Amino acid sequence: MEHIALFIACFVLTVLSALVTTYIAQGKPFWRWFIIGMVLPYVSIFIAMIMVYREHKAEEKQQKG
């Protein structure tokens, strides 16, 4: 049940983010900006994960050598 609540919360936040993106891009095609707004939050999460991974690897490398 916790997973469903977490999924719903993430989905609602993503849709709100997409709607804000669409609002900012007024006058442009709605669906294009809505899809961009839906995708970008997930892209930014992966970028953050990669950065943390690289920092962790760099710390391990410094400790070893």
Image (tube, rainbow, N blue to C red):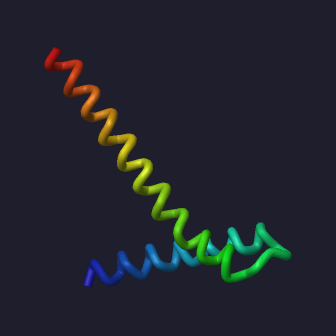
User: Which residue occupies 72% across, 74% down?
Assistant: 22
- Tell me how many marks there are: 0
Q: Is residue 19 visible?
A: no
* Lateral position of residue 4 relative to residue 41, left or right: left
Quadrant housing residue 5: bottom left
Quadrant housing residue 37: bottom right
* Lateral position of residue 25 relative to residue 13, left or right: right
User: Which residue occupies 69% across, 71% down?
Assistant: 20
Q: Quadrant of the C terminus?
A: top left
Q: Quadrant of the N terminus?
A: bottom left
Q: Nearer the viewer, residue 16 or 62?
A: 62
Residue 14 x/y as whole percent: 53, 73
User: Which residue occupies 37% across, 78% down?
Assistant: 7
Residue 31 x/y as whole percent: 67, 82
Quadrant housing residue 58: top left
Outermost residue, right direction?
27
* Lateral position of residue 45 relative to residue 33, left or right: left
Outermost residue, left direction?
64
Residue 53 x/y as whole percent: 30, 41
User: Which residue occupies 39% across, 41% down?
Assistant: 51
Residue 19 x/y as whole percent: 66, 76
Q: Is residue 45 visible?
A: yes
